[in-house]
Amino acid sequence: MVKVLPMQRRDFLASVLVGGPLSVAYAGAAQTSKPLQLATFQADVTPPLGSLLCHGYGTPAKKILDPLTARGIILLAEGPPIVLCAFDWIGISNASHDAARDALAEAVGTVQDRVSVHYVHQHNAPGIDASTEEILVAHGLSGKMFDPIVGRKAIERVAKAAGEAVKGAQPVTHLGYGLSKVEKVASTRRVLTPDGKLRFWRGSGGGTAEMKAAPEGLIDPYVRLLSFWDGQQPLVSITYYACHPCASYGSGGVSSEIMGHARALREAAVTEAAHVHFNGAGGDIAVGKYNDNTPATRPRLSKRLAAGMKTAWETQKKVPITAADVGWRSLPVRLPVSKSYNEAKLLKIIDNTKTSTRQRVLTVRKLAWLYLDRAGRRIDLSCLQIGPAQVLHMPGELFVEYQLAAQKLSPHRFVCMAAYGEYGPGYIGTEIAYGQGGYETRDNSSFTSPKVEKVLMTAMKQLLK
């Protein structure tokens, strides 16, 4: 489980494990004459038919069931603008993640460490990684994970939309915040025995009758909502919910899936506001318990999530805010690489043409992560503080234990978490989970070592304090 580190060890562990300076821009109690402003943006990121989906592992795009979008907000407070963005894609990794942040930063006139890019993690969607593509090119596998041109043009469209939006930023007078329990959507994928061992793994499809009958397990059952207002005019609704978004995938039907459909239902109900959704720490959570694998599953689960979003909206509290109430902390961390990764062994798999293309591409992803670590790459974690709310921006397919721990670390704040940021590390488990086995913590899924828990817990404490 995630362990809260003793306070007296925090500073020591921060210096040893985090390995980067904490960038703070927070005017919380200061007085300012600058008004708070906000802009929203949206761009189409639907791949063309024939595009590779799910990192090239699934059936290429055969039909567009519904369009994919990238959506975000730009906050203009003290200091350079703050940008938060979520793509309807399975992932954005490494150099591609940097490119997306750089493009948005340039478009709105800010710096990279004040831009947070995430993905909702739909599997019937592209996943891009320019660092992996560079190695794929060298081994005659270019384009076997994603289409680089499609990825580049999509990022350009999103950046252009943000650049246009910031010109029409609107004043913000109030922040809204609320939460509601979501019924019968999420369930743990890692069903444990009473003594803490892995009993079985329950994916999005649910599996056997025994798997579906097992309890929901450890989840965060609440959808959280933040909203920004100009007087009585809502500008944007931002929601956070921790769960894999997929009811079905792999058949080539491009879709924004459960979370995108729930977002669309709220968009139709509250037409005057923009709607942005971020996936929380749902790496070990899916819809398996409630998925009967019929065409009716996706709309049924979407309506349940939308119902929770609706209640959170209708019961939210509103408080006045100004630019002085907005703070931003950014902290670069170096995540420990899986000890099983060996360059010579990885190259041997990649160069073996008898190995499946899927396995070769996956192995290149591991090698790209290893090379970036050797180069000293760090990943930016960040925290937006605004009035009574704090929003943590975290990498990878993070386990829900981190989200629950963050809420306990800051019990007097309204804490939201956007995980599924930098996708380079893949799944990020807890220390104990790496010893339990299961899909998420094997070396084909998680590129980090069990030591990652200590690094992230230390960083979250720094960001939330």
Image (cartoon, rainbow, N blue to C red):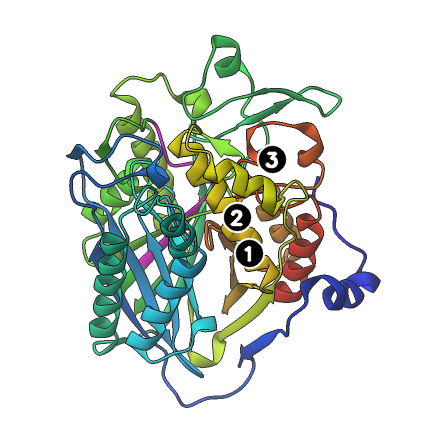
Q: Is residue 102 magenta?
A: no
Q: Is residue 228 above or below residue 441?
A: below
Question: From where the camera sits, is residue 399 visible?
Answer: no
Q: Residues within 10 Å of mark 1 (few under 14, many from 20)?
A: some
Question: From where the camera sits, is residue 271 visible?
Answer: yes
> In this view of the protein, which residue sits in the foreground, 319 or 405?
405
Q: What amino acid type is highlighted by mark number 1?
A: Tyr
Whether tag 2 and tag 3 are in contact, CB under 8 A, the answer is no
Front of the two marks 2 and 3:
2
Q: Is residue 245 magenta?
A: yes
Give the image location of residue 155, x and y in percent: 27, 61
Mark 1 element type: helix
Q: Residues within 10 Å of mark 2 (few under 14, many from 20)?
A: many
Q: What residue is pinned by disc 3?
A: 441
The image quadrant that residue 446 belongs to is top right
Mark 3 element type: helix
Q: What residue is pinned by disc 2?
A: 367
Mark 2 vs 3, N-terminal side: 2
Label 1 to label 3, Cα distance in Å?
Answer: 21 Å
Residue 211's tag is none
Q: What residue is pinned by disc 1?
A: 371
Whether tag 1 and tag 2 are in contact, CB under 8 A, the answer is yes
- The residues colored magenta run 237-247
The image quadrant that residue 8 belongs to is bottom right
Give the image location of residue 69, x and y in percent: 24, 51
Give the image location of residue 399, x and y in percent: 57, 41
Q: Residue at x 28, y 45 (%)?
A: 263
Q: Quadrant of the N terminus?
A: top right
> In this view of the protein, which residue sits in the foreground, 148 or 121?
148
